[in-house]
Amino acid sequence: MAPGGGICKDVIESRVAFADYDMATSSMELRGSPLRKAATGLGENLGATSTNDVHELLECPVCVNLMYPPIYQCPNGHTVCSICKARVHNSCPTCRNELGNIRCLALEKVAESLELPCRYQTLGCHDIFPYYSKLKHEKNCRYRPYNCPYAGADCCVTGNISFLVMHLKNDHKVDMHDGCTFNHRYVKSNPHEVENATWMLTVFNCFGRQFCLHFEAFHIGMAPVYMAFLRFMGDEDEARQFSYSLEVGGNGRKFIWQGVPRSIRDSHRKVRDSQDGLIIQRNLALFFSGGDRQELKLKVAGRIWKEQ
């Protein structure tokens, strides 16, 4: 069984979201406010304004993320993002005045004129995007960090593949194997008492890449089942270059599954719920186990190969 507990590190992720850009807006005079002066300066000489100054203007004072429409402001010109507006109960976090539904159209217009690098620039993405397209790109950027593929505990560690391999080995103590063929044995006494269970993750180094073998018990509807499936530590387009087979049997019978490993971009739960793997009903698994069917002793053999 997988050990409990999780290893968490600070994960910076954007919490901003697009709201209906065509919503009804209110207008007000910003004459004399610091925001009006800053926005006017940007409009007159945007090229001379440093990126840091622009980022400071567009940074929400509560969550310190970049703001996207609708951007709200108080009567004194202080701004806040739409998500944090609800968090502060419609009270300006700077001067405590009521925020109301006043949109900061000037700052939204300034943002439209900007082009910014991807937040994952230091990880290898060198593309430049219009301000309002940047967030959409970053959600699917191929250079964005991967989530830890370990399924036995809530783990929020992210990183590149080499970092996650060491994390799995050192922090989760997973089994690491070299080779493209395997033969695993899953044992559990009193399997009828186990409704939901996750066995220890196994990682295979094959063709210079890493593959995660999952095995667990859960229900499909009312039926108790066991499921084995493989995930690829990389993106989906790379995962499609490989195939794998899983084989389970006993008492002269054999059951074979063949498929394409899923990328770890897809969560463990998403792959499991899609039933994209070898699924064995509990009664059949106990039949394969032999004996009096009171103990699970399931042998799962597999092979990974690269498509030409």
Image: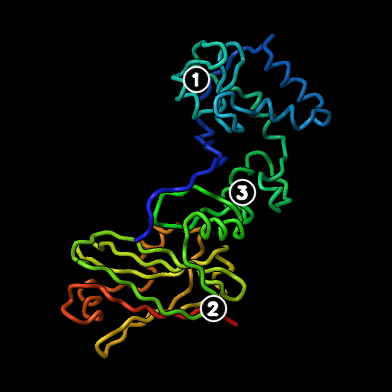
Q: Please identify the residue farthest to the bottom as the structure is shown.
A: 252
Q: Residues within 10 Å of mark 3 (few under 14, many from 20)?
A: some
Helix or strand or loop: what does disc 3 sit on?
Answer: helix
Please give the name of the residue rendered at 63% of the width and 28% of the height, measured from the top-left corner: 59
Amino acid under disc 1: Asn
Please give the name of the residue rendered at 57% of the width and 79% of the height, measured from the top-left corner: 306
Direction from residue 25 to residue 252 in the image, left or right: left
The image quadrant that residue 165 belongs to is bottom right
Q: Quadrant of the C terminus?
A: bottom right
Helix or strand or loop: what does disc 2 sit on?
Answer: loop
| Mark 1 vs mark 3, CA separation in Å | 29 Å
Mark 3 highlights which residue?
137
Amino acid under disc 3: His
| Mark 1 vs mark 2, CA separation in Å | 61 Å
Q: Which mark is drawn over residue 101?
A: 1
N-terminal of the two: label 3 or label 2? 3
Observer-nearest of 272 and 110: 272
Direction from residue 245 to residue 58 in the image, left or right: right
Q: Position of residue 174 (x, y in %)?
A: 47, 62
| Mark 3 vs mark 2, CA separation in Å | 36 Å
The image quadrant that residue 133 belongs to is top right
Mark 2 highlights which residue?
179
Q: Position of residue 234 (x, y in %)?
A: 57, 63
Amino acid under disc 2: Gly
Please give the name of the residue rendered at 56% of the width and 11% of the height, measured from the top-left corner: 95
Q: Residues within 10 Å of mark 1 (few under 14, many from 20)?
A: some
Q: Is residue 74 above or below residue 300?
A: above
